[in-house]
Amino acid sequence: MTYGHFSEDGREYIITRPDTPKPWINYLSNDRYCALCSQTGGGYSFFETAGYNRVTKEYPPLVVSTDRPGRYVYLRDRETGEYWGATWQPVCKDPTHFESRHGMGYTVVESGYSEIDSHITYFVPPRDDLEVWMVKLKNTGIKPRKLQAFVYVKWDLANYAFNLAEAAFSNLFNESSMEDGIMFVSSRFWNITSGSAGNPNARWDKLAFLTASFKLDGFDCFDEAFIGPYHSWGNPVAVERGSCSGTVGDGQDIAGALQHDFELGPGEETEFIVLLGVVRHKEDARSISRRYDSWGEADRALNEVKMYWNNYLSRTICKTPDPDFDLQVNVWNKYQAWITSRWARMDSYYIGGGSIVGHRDSWQDTLAILPNDIEWVRQRVVYLLEHQFPDGSTLHNWDPLTNIGVKTGHSDDPLWLVLGVIEYLKESGELVFLDEAVRYYDGGSETVRQHIVKAIAYVLDHMSDRGIPLMMAADWNDGLDHVGRQGRGESTMVAEHLAWMLREMATLLWFVGSDTLAQKYIEQRDKLIRDINEHLWDGDWYIRGTRDDGEAFGSARNINGRIYINAQSWAVLGQAAPRERAIRCMNSVEKHLDTEYGPALFLPAYREPDPKIGIITRFAPGAKENGAIFNHPVCWAVMAECLLGRGDRAYDIWKRSSFVNLGKRPDVYKVEPYVYCEYIHGPDSPTFGQGDFTWTTGTATWMWKVCVDWILGVRAELRGLLVDPCIPSSWDEFQITRRFRRATYEIHVVNPEHINQGVAEIEVDGERWASHLLPVFSDGKTHKVEVRMGAAHGAVETPEELAAQRIAE
Ligand code: GLC
């Protein structure tokens, strides 16, 4: 079965039937207002945070597959009484034609039923906090028609979790009013500071509004009046009957329903705009509705959205022999990484409307934004640093509105901060940033340099007697949450991450002249690497860690969870593995973890809950962190293979796990074929091959980074832009254009000998250049770089950065 395809220019995904195996959604969003919109107009909206500033309702993750409610327009024939949904949902009558197009920042749904064509464009303008629906209806028949349109949303104000759990009680606080054709709704209760319990004595400090540019022939604010008892979204009584009841007032379960009666002659068309948004004062809604209420004004705002995305997408562009690779890097993976950087893991169709900024996730999410919007990353870096403590530890996550957070003791958290700051410095070259003072979460401030030094110190202070970092609450893998609660379990991944960061810190400190500390880090790193290899090597791969009782897990001695991918890939990333072991452990990944959809996180999946390991063993076998193909680590496997120079293998892993490839079997994969999902159900699952938890995943940032930095091999280093491709040998050539600091680099690479890695010759602006590190230009101009790959790479010097990254042969 096919459900859709990419448009010719790749900028849209065109869905050709409404009943996709799961809702296939898009995120329509500026930095503040966010609307999740499926191919049939399903989904919900929120402002700034999904947990405390919810606007409209959906019922994920309870019933993802029903995808209800949404942004609906019911249409009704006033003569026959027949009615249907302009986006197919929620009435679901067979359309005469259907097409839904997800684009960058907008979604279009077109369909036909009973000789009436409808066309709706949904988007969120860049400057104001609302969503706009541009609705066009056309009579394609030969008879004049008397029709009605009912615009419908279900409000869900402010308190997402509370409203869900305490629906009847939360209704007591709802307010609704109609003023000059604008529906206003708010809540007298905002549980922002007290979770779901207690009375915070606060009202929501915002209002939501709904209005349409048509003549209003009726409305309902009470959901019960519109839908009717024992009816549902598929057959609301108001639509069945052909009239709303004009319900309005306080203390009810509220909906936004607006009725419009109209006539359409044969071939005649009509259009109207629906505006739905969040404001502080009613006056703001009035002025917003004046700004957007004509088709021309709405269209202008839609063009602004398109211009924003055209501009953003133009910033790093590649052209390779693989059009799927280009489509992902240039368009969809880049777009997904932007969405993830703004909204991860606060909300999705799969995550229950939290209000949380995750520390480790947010650092990683900056990585794919770096070359494309460095100003945004800079602000974000400062913001994230402000959630560190003076002892180097950090909050694990926090609510962005109240800034209240939790410190969980995850062992990896401080290391992501180090990685994020160093990557920012490499891209920006702004070394003075190291001397900038940044606040700590609980008071006081120190320089950025102190922030990163203390982060490292914190990890070095939390080691086992034999010199391996403790697992503590868990590491990157949240599911390993009872391995080290008693303070003895160890984490191989954190050890390898620390080895990597110690090297990065030493390189940075040498670069800025702090040789003594750099030297100390190198010594600590050497010792750590010795300890890793002495205690964590299992024969053919590295164990994943040890439990509080001293038992190894991720070992050949285990029946379940015998080999974990991260312990191998990070041994390479952190250069903790000598070359022979690096090759051997990555070969073990191929041998024991490979599946047709990419390598699994570990195998075999746990079959029985093991309280000495944690929640990972409680997930169903093959699901989530329990033996699924977790895409985020798949990226690190690609990177590790590039570090080993095995470009064919790296590309093969990327290709198999790429959404374009997985989307070719939509009835198995089920989820959106234009973005990465967090994981694919593993071989131990009855639904092997199905994607899950789409959109907001660390895969978005890492896969993009790995493709650009490691496969194409063009990456920022402190001293300049480095070129070191690791491509499939079948590629003859490729190009990449990228901004770096103040100039643009147009890089063309040829591969006449069909090798994976190795540069024989470089020319910059027509002149021979003797290093993999390209010159740093500050002239704002475009510079042409010609690179010839070749097995004899004598003519191009290997700079220290690259030498340090290569695992010695
Ligand atoms: C999810 C979490 C991330 C974690 C990963 C593995 O993606 O958001 O923080 O590292 O799962 O547990």
Image: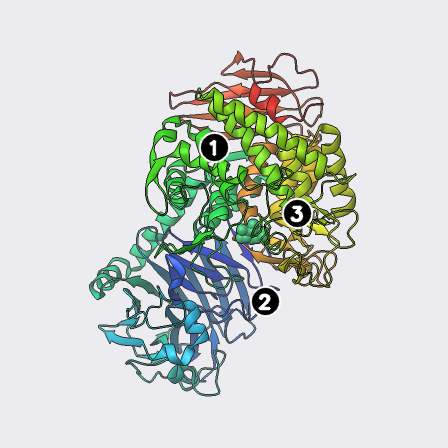
Badge 2 vs badge 3, beta-carbon distance below 8 Å: no
Give whichever of 60, 420 is nearer the camera. 420
Amino acid under disc 3: Ser
Residue 56, relative to residue 103: is it above or below? below
Closest to the observer: 166 or 12?
Answer: 166
Disc nearest the viewer among 2 and 3: 3
Q: Which amino acid does label 2 sit on?
A: Asp
Which of the two discs, 3 and 1, labels the residue nearer the N terminus?
1
Pointer 2 residue: 19
Residue type pointed to by label 1: Ile
Quadrant the N terminus occupies: bottom right
Coloration of the structure image: rainbow
Residue carrying label 1: 422
Q: Is residue 238 in sight in this rendering?
A: yes
Could you say which quadrant of the image residue 321 lies in? top right
Q: Is residue 448 above or below residue 408?
A: above
| Residue labelled with disc 3 | 657
Within-10-Å neighbours for mark 1: few <14, some 14–19, many 20+: many
> If the image is split into quadrants, where does the C terminus sit?
top right
Mark 3 Cα within 10 Å, few/some/many (few <14, many 20+)? many
Q: CB at mark 1 closer than 8 A to ligand 1?
A: no
- Observer-side mark, 3 or 1, equals 1
Q: Measuring 28% from the left and 81% from the top, which residue is drawn there?
A: 249
